[in-house]
Amino acid sequence: MPQSATAEPQRHAAVVYNPIKVDLDALRETVHTAAQQAGWGDTRWYETSEEDPGTGQAKQAVDDGAEVVLSAGGDGTIRAVAEGLRGSDVPIALLPSGTGNLLARNMKLTLDRLEESVTTAFTGTDRRIDLGVVELERPDGKRETRAFLVMAGLGLDAAMIENTDPGLKKKVGWLAYVGGIARSVGSKNYIRLRFKLDDQPTRNLRVNTMLIGNCGLLTGNILLLPDAVVDDGVFDIVALRPEGFFGWVQILVKVVWENGVLRRSSLGRKILSNTKEVRTLRYLRGKEIVIRPDDPRPVQLDGDTFGQIVALRAKVEDLALAVRIPRDEADELPASEKAQEEERVPA
């Protein structure tokens, strides 16, 4: 029977892609096949640029009626697309590539099987996660609002990213950060800052790095924030305060051995229950934090530098982003008790 002239148009997906990160011909073919098999209409394509890494394109895709936005690129593309989807109910589907893939790793999603990831975009179900939103204040007084999915950082980690050779990162991946560390360690490592966490009094702190985490797993499978959950409505925050070489050794032992090894077994967790916290790492939790360094400092969001700031305000937007995940793995992928309770409440 011929389609009625008044029939509703077919649903369609959008792909926001970084042309440097993807094999566009292979991606187009895979997406076209998956869309046809799912009975969807023609997919619309939006290329990122140096000026706009995906935020404007994602907003345009929503305005154009996309029912899912596939983000094809590295962590920067995924962060930008999520920022563009903020305030909408359109889910993001991850087609990760590049060196980090941190959100996909934290959610235990497929990293290197393109067909599976694309099929999930058209046939999967949605898992809602928190979105980190930061208001950045520049040295000239201007302000801008950005979103992040994994982690925001102020201090050595931001300087490290700022000092990392982009060409080297493309060739050797996360190992390129070693050079960034080497170039950053020789600079003024410590910063003095004031911070206010939720309704607590303002405090002063001398730190090397301060990280605000929505997720806990970093590049290289390093578990920095072991209690961080992507949908629990709070940030997990850590201040790194090493004093000399042995301070860095303490941090390495804590992160690599305790977090990365001991926490993965019941015996290891029992050992940790009798272990004292080290002064070089200070852990905090909260829904909103305001940080003011004594002088302008670089800031990073999900592994990309965002220039110098004199203050930032970060807050959690509870379950503000829908992520498309495989339907048959919905019960296996991480979800906090809070998120599960939200899913049980009728819309």
Image (cartoon, rainbow, N blue to C red):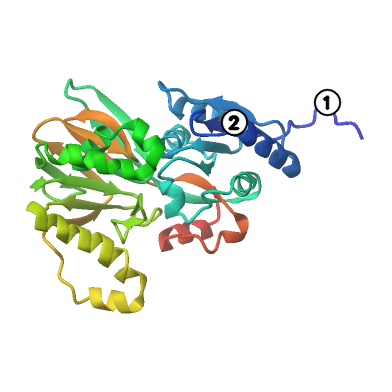
> What residue is pinned by disc 1?
5
Give the x, y percent position of residue 300: 28, 37
Give the x, y percent position of residue 7: 79, 31
> What residue is pinned by disc 2?
24
Identify the secondary structure beneath mark 1.
loop
Question: Is residue 37 left or right of 207 when viewed as pictured?
Answer: right
Question: Is residue 40 left or right of 78 when viewed as pictured?
Answer: right
Give the x, y percent position of residue 209: 18, 45
Q: How many circles with numbers are drawn on the protein?
A: 2
Identify the secondary structure beneath mark 2.
helix
Label 2 Cα crowd, 10 Å radius (few <14 / some 14-19 / many 20+): some
For this rendering, which residue is in front, 294 or 157?
157
For this rendering, which residue is in front, 134 or 76?
76
Give the x, y percent position of residue 165: 30, 32
Q: Residue at x 90, y 31 (%)?
A: 2
Q: Residue at x 52, y 36 (%)?
A: 72
Position of 103 relative to 226 (above/below): above
Q: Of callouts 1 and 2, which one flags the residue occurring earlier in the amino acid sequence?
A: 1
Q: Give the number of the mark in front: 1 or 2.
A: 2
Label 1 Cα crowd, 10 Å radius (few <14 / some 14-19 / many 20+): few
Position of 231 relative to 176 (above/below): below
**Where, quadrant-wise, is the N terminus in this rendering?**
top right
The image quadrant that residue 11 belongs to is: top right
For this rendering, which residue is in front, 24 or 103?
24
Question: Is residue 235 left or right of 78 when viewed as pictured?
Answer: left
Q: Residue at x 18, y 33 (%)?
A: 311
The image quadrant that residue 188 belongs to is: top left
Kindly identify the amino acid type of the residue bearing the numbered disc 1: Ala
Asked whether residue 324 is in view, the answer is yes
Position of 130 relative to 53 (above/below): below
Kindly identify the amino acid type of the residue bearing the numbered disc 2: Leu
